[in-house]
Amino acid sequence: MALLTHTLSCLFGIGSWVAINGMWVELPLIVPDIPEGWYLPSYLTVLIQMANIGPLFVTLMHRFHPGKLSEVAVIYTIIGVGILASFLLAFFWKETLVVAGSSRSVALLVLTFFLSTVDCTSSVTFLPFMMRLKPQYMTTYFIGEGLSGLVPGLVALVQGVGMVKCINQTQTINGSFGNSTASLELQAWYQPAMFSAQVFFFFLSVMMVVCLGAFLLLNYHPNVRREHKSSRYIEGGIHDENGELSPRENSQPEQKPMISPLESQQPAAQSSFGSGKYSWPECLFLFVVLGWANALTNAVLPAVQSYSCLPYGNNAYHMSATLGAVANPVACFIAMFLPNRSFLLLGVLTLAGTGFGSYIMTTAVLSPCPFLIHYSTGAMLIVMAWVLFVLSLSYVKVMIGVILRDEGHSALVWCGAVVQLGSMLGALTMFPLVSVFGLFKSGDSCNTKCPI
């Protein structure tokens, strides 16, 4: 039964961000057929930040009306919206309407906004829901969340999205006296996909259905329900096995959960947050590191991935994207078998991840002629930098989630809110730098010429 619950927790986690991750990896196939062209990524960034109205609403409800908002009902709603939106995308992503005299992909943008709302809101609902299960299933959920980027990436890889060949083409140059000369020049040729974008959106819809099925079984399967806690005390209220806030039966002071003799010898609570085990400076450290890690991994570095990798070739780009996606669930597996809650270790790993990210950002700034562009060592270093960057910061995020899980339901709600806040600040910082001021220059994997 533990294996079944681990599997369901993983499938539930996959549904958290699979829709928007799938949209990003499918961009090379979508962009040629829509009027927005390569401005679409900029629009997606704005839509995802607008979608933070979902987690903002949930967080405010938990803050000012605790126990009034049913988490289960919200999760059913957002998964249902995700299924419907991804299904409709398969039919309407190409459809356009004339808005203010210009053709616009209104259906694509509106449905993407709904998918963004689903995924953003999952950060403040899925995580708190996992409080109802035993602690070991939290790490499995994070593995699923990591796979939400890897799974659509692998499907897109099989599909052949963005695969480029450099082929020789003859260029004819007309001279001033009617003479013409011919020269050979490498041109990028995008190979046709194995299946269409419509099939890919059907796949995303199926993944959301799988997430719904996993959630239903986590709630109602009799054997899985044995893995639920029978009762617990969270944020001053007694929660039943379904996690809903129950009224107190009497006015006597709340009983404390049973603690071990070793725990009883620990110092008194230092703060009123969660269980009070950590002081306010320690809680602030956790949230600052969590926000910083998510800003880097979810917004800042992904915005410049193509600039940092494409100068080294198309293979370097695809290897960094694929292995980076693999590194996320690998970090979750490491956290499952080698957990370490040391604040010192979390700080060191955060600094290490920031260092790898700084190298990646430097190569992006120097694009199209970064370090070692004429050497295979350069491609190896950028791929390794991406893998180690994702690996270190993913471990940090998982361990902070595990720590906050022990602090209670409210701590996990704030955990999801900080994840979204960090991602939003990172995106709002990079959007003008990339899309407005054009500070980054893209490299051509076939024709970029740099001094040796």
Image (tube, rainbow, N blue to C red):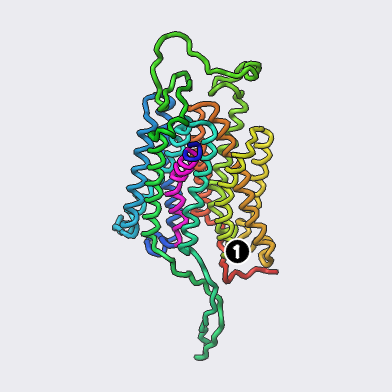
* Mark 1 Cα shell of 10 Å, populated few (<14), some (14-19), many (≥20): many
Residue stretch in magenta: 5-28
| Along the line of sight, the residue nearer the viewer: 17 or 139 | 139
Q: Give residue 224's position: percent from left, percent from top.
A: 44, 34
Q: Main secondary structure of the magenta part?
A: helix
* Vertical order, 326 against 57 (above or below): below
Residue positioned 29% across, 58% down in the render:
98
Secondary element under disc 1, as helix, strand or loop, is: helix
Question: In the rendered image, which quarter is residue 199 located in?
Answer: bottom left
Q: Give residue 355's position: percent from left, percent from top.
A: 67, 47
Residue positioned 59% across, 43% down in the render:
333
Question: In the rendered image, which quarter is residue 314 located in?
Answer: bottom right
Q: In the figure, is residue 142 to the left or right of 375?
A: left
Residue type at numbered disc 1: Pro
The quadrant of the rendering that contains the C terminus is bottom right
Q: Give residue 36's position: percent from left, percent from top.
A: 39, 59
- Number of marks present in the image shown: 1
Q: Give residue 169's position: percent from left, percent from top.
A: 52, 80
Residue receiving disc 1: 311
User: Is 26 within the magenta?
Assistant: yes
Whether residue 117 is visible, yes or no, is: no
